[in-house]
Amino acid sequence: MSWYCDLAPGHPVHHAYHESEYGFPLRDDQALLERLSLEIFQAGLSWELILKRRASLKEAFAGFDPHILASWNDEAVPLLLQNPGIIRNRRKVKAILENARILMCLKAEYGSLANWIDAHHPLVHKDWVRVFRRTFRFTGPEIVKEFLMSTGWLPGAHHAQCPVYTRILAANPPWRKAMEHGFSYD
């Protein structure tokens, strides 16, 4: 198995994300929507490309503020697709806008996206995929896995020998709590 921990440390593009974001628990709706959107944009592309375009994506998508994006209609799609700084894939762009609207509905019902995830947690990967596919757009197995690993709901972001792993354990991610209570993600 190839680990991100073997590639990222010291890398000019991957290092900062590996050291301070990947696998750390997130609860903020805007940060969660950004991470889900980045994973969607990454589908079929390299993570390095997404990290390089992250600032442009944030700018084009109003910082991934779900309140703002939920108000954008389909007329925003052609304008976004003219932006050379983003990933110009119509299905992905439409999914981001639709997912912002879905997030706002979940927020109304659960208080936040994190609370919605908590209401389903813990689940094994295949069950998470079913839940996400019923709820969000453009969320296949790899997108769901990486989103949940990168935000602390699934284990596996770092190997146990990685120095970041200890810091993630100290942040008490939801997957750790579930495992301490006997849940197995296998």
Image (cartoon, grey):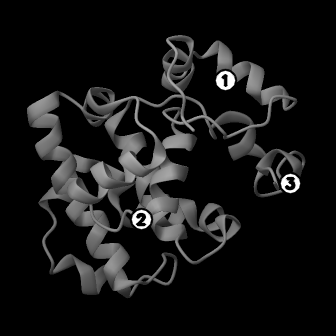
Q: Residue 176: image x %, image y %? A: 57, 20
From this view, report whether residue 89 is shown above or below residue 94.
below
Q: Earlier in the sequence, mark 1 or mark 3?
A: 3
Quarter of the picture holding the N terminus? bottom right
Q: Residue 149: image x %, image y %? A: 56, 42
From this view, report whether residue 85 is shown above or below residue 163.
below
Callouts 1 and 3 close, C-beta under 8 Å: no
Q: Which residue is mark 2?
A: 140
From this view, report whether residue 54 is shown above or below residue 16.
below
In the figure, is residue 182 to the left or right of 29?
right
Looking at the rendered structure, the secondary structure element under dot 3 is: helix
Q: CA distance from mark 2 to mark 1?
A: 25 Å
Residue type for callout 3 = Leu
Residue type for callout 2 = Gly
Q: CA distance from mark 1 to mark 3?
A: 18 Å
Using the rendered view, name the quadrant where residue 170 is placed.
top right
Q: Could you tell me if residue 37 is visible in this image?
A: yes
**Dot 1: few (<14), some (14–19), or many (≥20) neighbours within 10 Å?**
many
Q: Nearer the viewer, residue 125 or 144?
A: 125
Q: Residue 85: image x %, image y %? A: 52, 77
From this view, report whether residue 27 is shown above or below residue 106.
above
The image's mark for residue 7 is 3
Q: Which residue is mark 1?
A: 168
